[in-house]
Image (tube, rainbow, N blue to C red):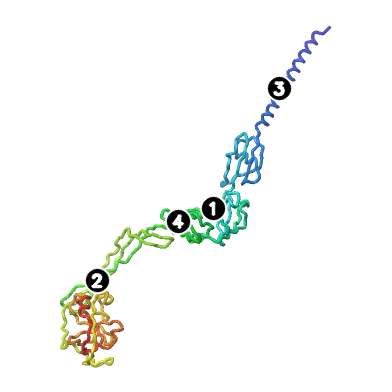
Amino acid sequence: MINQSNAKGLKGISRAVLIAVITFVLSIAIFATTAFAGLASQYNVEIVVDNNDAIVITTNETEPIEILAQANITLADSDKLDISQFNSGEGGTIKIDKLNSINVEFDSVINTYSVYEDTVGEALESLGIELNNDTKMNYELTDPVVDGMVITIKSAKSVTLTADGKDTKYAIYQGTVKDLLELAQITLGKDDYTKPSLDTQLEADMKVTVYRVEYKTVTETETVKYKTTTVKKSSMNEGTEKVVTEGVNGEDQVTYNVKYVNGKEENRTETERVTVKEPVNKVVNVGTKKVSSGSSTVKSNGVTSKNGYTVGQKISGRYTHYCACGKCGSGSGVTASGKRVYNGMSNPYYVACNWLPMGSVIKVNGQNYTVVDRGGSGLSTVGRIDIFTPEGHAACYRYGTGSCSIEIVRLGW
C-alpha cells in the first residue's frame, strides 16, 4: 500500500527535474545555434600588395579598411585601393598599389618620378620613356619596382629640355613637345610658351626651351630734358649769342607695363605719365646784325707771324662747303670756337681749317673769312679750307669744290 503523502512528494520532484532538464537542453540548443551562426558569417578575403604574394585572411568584417586593419596593413594617403574584385560578406580580392619613388639616370642627369607600376618596364612605359636596341640599362624590364631605386639608362639619343634655368636630358624622342613637358611635370602659365611649339614632333637630339612670361607694373622717375629756344636779335652782331634763361630739366613719374621673358625685360608699354616738375626751357639771344667782312674792317691784334705763318702771306688753296646739318657734322650748331651757326642765318663768312690759329682771318678769292671751326684730318693740309654755307646742304653740293687763292689777313683773335 502506497503512502499517499510520499506519492505526492515524488510527483513534485519529477516535475522540477523535468523543467531543469528541459532548460538545460534549450540552453545547449541556443548555444549551438549561436556558435554555428558565428562560424557561418566568417569568410576568406585575399589581399594583394603591388602584385606580390597574396595574403588570405578569414574575417567577419565587411569594410575593406577594417579587413586591412585586421591584417595589420595601413594605407598611406598616396596608396591606391582596388576593391573591384571584392564582395562584402562573401569574399574576393583586395588589391593595393603603393606609390613608389624611382630615380632615372640618363646621361649623368638624375630625375625623380613617382609611379604606381609594379615592374621597371611598366614604370618606364608610364613615363613615356621608350627604349631601343641601343639602350643599355642596369635593370631588366621585368624586375619589380623598389622604392628609391636608381634606374640607369644609356642611350645614343636624347632630347634636351631647358626650363626654369635648368637643362635636363630625357630618353624620349617620340611624341610631341607637349608630351615632353608632361613627362617633365612642367606646367605652362597662360602667357608661357615653348620653342619649338607644343605640337612639334620630337626628334633625336632636339633642344626644347620653355619661356616663362610675366608682366609687372613698374613706376619710375624720369628726367625731362629742357629745350633750347633761340631769339634773333638785330641789335647783336652775327655769330654772337647771350643766354637769357638757363635751362632746368623737369621730372615725370612714369608707369610702365613691363614684359619679362625668363626673368629678362623684353619690352615695356607706358600706361601713365604724371608731371612732377615742369622743365624750364633755355632761352638764347642770337645776334643777326651783319658785320662787314671787308679787309678794312678787320681789327689787327698786333701779331705779324705765328706757327710759321705771316700776315700778308699768300697760299694756293682748295675749298669745300659745309652747313649746320647733322650730315655735315654733329648738327649741334656750335663751332669748335663756340660760335653758334644755323642754316638760314645771314652769312657769317666762317671757315673751318686745322692749320691756322682759331680766330684768324683769311681772304679767299677776295672775300674775308674768319677761322672758327675745325674738321677732319684732311683740313690739316696747308691751304685746305671748308667754307660754312648757311643756305643748307643742297647749296653745299651746288657750290661744290675748287681751287682758290688765300691771303692771311690776321693770325688769331
Mark positioned earlier in the residue sequence (4 or 3): 3
Which callout, 3 or 1, points to the residue nearer the camera?
1
* Residue 164 visible (yes or no): no
Asked if residue 31 is positioned above or below residue 243 in the image, the reply reads: above
| SS at circle 2 | strand
Numbered mark located on residue 228 in the image: 2
Camera-nearest residue between 199 and 193: 199
Q: Judging from the image, what secondary structure is the residue with disc 1 in?
A: loop
Q: Does label 3 or label 1 sit earlier along the sequence? A: 3
Q: Residue at x 18, y 87 (%)?
A: 365
Tags 4 and 3 touching, CB below 8 Å: no
Which disc number belongs to residue 127?
Answer: 1
User: Mark 4 near mark 1, Cβ–Cβ under 8 Å?
Assistant: no
Residue topped by disc 4: 200
- Where is residue 53 drawn, in percent x and y? 66, 45
Q: Give the number of the disc on residue 26.
A: 3
Q: Residue furthest top?
A: 1
Nearer-the-camera pick, 144 or 281: 144
Q: CA distance from mark 4 to mark 1?
A: 19 Å
* Residue mark closest to the camera, 4 vs 3: 4
**Where's residue 265, x and y in %?**
40, 62
Residue 19 sits in which quadrant? top right
Which residue type does callout 3 highlight? Leu
